[in-house]
Image (cartoon, helix red, strand yellow):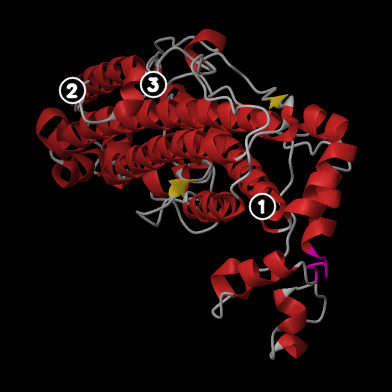
Amino acid sequence: MQDPPSSEPWRQWHDGLELDRSWPSPERGIVVDRAELKKRSKQMVIDALGAKTSVSDGTHSDRMPSSAFGHYVWGTDFGAYSPVAVMRTDLDGAWTSADKMMTALNRKFSGLKERSEAFHESYEGFGQLVYVAATNYDTAEGILHRRLDKLRKAVHGQRDPGHSRPPSDTEPWREEDVSANSAAGIRKFFDRSHPERLLDLGVVLHDFAGRMADAAAAIEGHSKGLAQVWGSEAAELCQQALRMLHASSKTLAYDAGRTGDVLLTFGELYWRYKENCAKAVGDFEIDDLWEWAGGEDDDDDDRARRYLREFNQNMGVCYDLIPADAELLLPQIAYVEYVDLYHDEEGTYFDRLEKDEPFSWLFDNPWKESFQDPILPKESATEILETQLREPYSHWSQ
């Protein structure tokens, strides 16, 4: 791999999930600065929503890839999402190596998507809880005090039960026998591939890693600010929640960034082999015409097999670099669907939370008749807080 830029902080976060030992702690008994608490918690909600990244199937350059991206790399017909179907239905010989690489990357993208969604859900839910507490402080403090055990249990967190070992540990790379592959089949394999997708998605994941690094910095800033204006037992627990979100954002950033490195390295390798295939293996049209007429060219087949074998060996090096899934530890606090901020053009979300008024965008929207089954609850701010503290929310099925 190329030497990484020193400006990417996530490259230093290679030690796995680690809670910051110097995390701020509020002083007990300080006079609560309600105006500053409301201001800082509002910004935290905005930052949490702004950190969210959409997921793509591989056709959007500004989103995270999904597990179906292999469909676009292999250039299949619409609907044939499996790289196995592409390589084994009309290509002769063995393609287990390429299949294995695509399967590993698809699983990696699926894991990143799941962990990203869980992180943002927890971050948004926690920001919502603190803002509700800030805007309705007297009532909220009473709720927090009565349900302190529930808050403590929720803040204790949920550790990601997913895999923590890289693919190379669970399914080691092995060189496959390509003696049955023909030159024509090998040329088809490279000709129909789209390695530029790997390069595009490598950039996407580097961008996502940067977003997670920004989220980590923002969470650290929120923690320092809240510690100066809010001091209570509930505030201490909220600091622990921020500490866990901070650590989890760093592991997510590193996982996505290193996966982006693998995609860029593999994409460059793949692109080079595709561009050089005709020169290294032979001319596609002339050789195919010769074979169609009944001629045989063992030299072409031997040369093509050496080429594919070399490609598979280099692909195995990239496979061994795919990192383990990020380990997360998240506060078990749900985000209560209260209003769609992206459609809240009048800015009523924060105003109504502050006034503790029931509100749902679907119900209050003048075009609500177009929604047959409104799903957002009409809940006041304090009712949201009660809902969040009823039971710890599970971000993963156990």
- Closer to us: 376 or 236: 236
x and y, in percent, of residue 115 in the image: 59, 35
Which residue is the site of mark 1? 134
Name which residue type carries label 2: Gln
Q: Residue at x 74, y 24 (%)?
A: 156
Q: CA distance from mark 3 to mark 1?
A: 69 Å
Magenta-tinted stretch: 375-380
| Mark found first going from the N terminus, 2 or 3 | 2
Which of discs 1 and 2 lies nearer the camera? The answer is 1
x and y, in percent, of residue 226 in the image: 55, 39
Name which residue type carries label 3: Ala
Residue 69 is left or right of residue 1, and the answer is: right
Which residue is the site of mark 3? 180
- Closer to us: 222 or 70: 222
Q: Could you tell me which quadrant the N terminus lies in?
A: top left
Which residue is the site of mark 2? 2
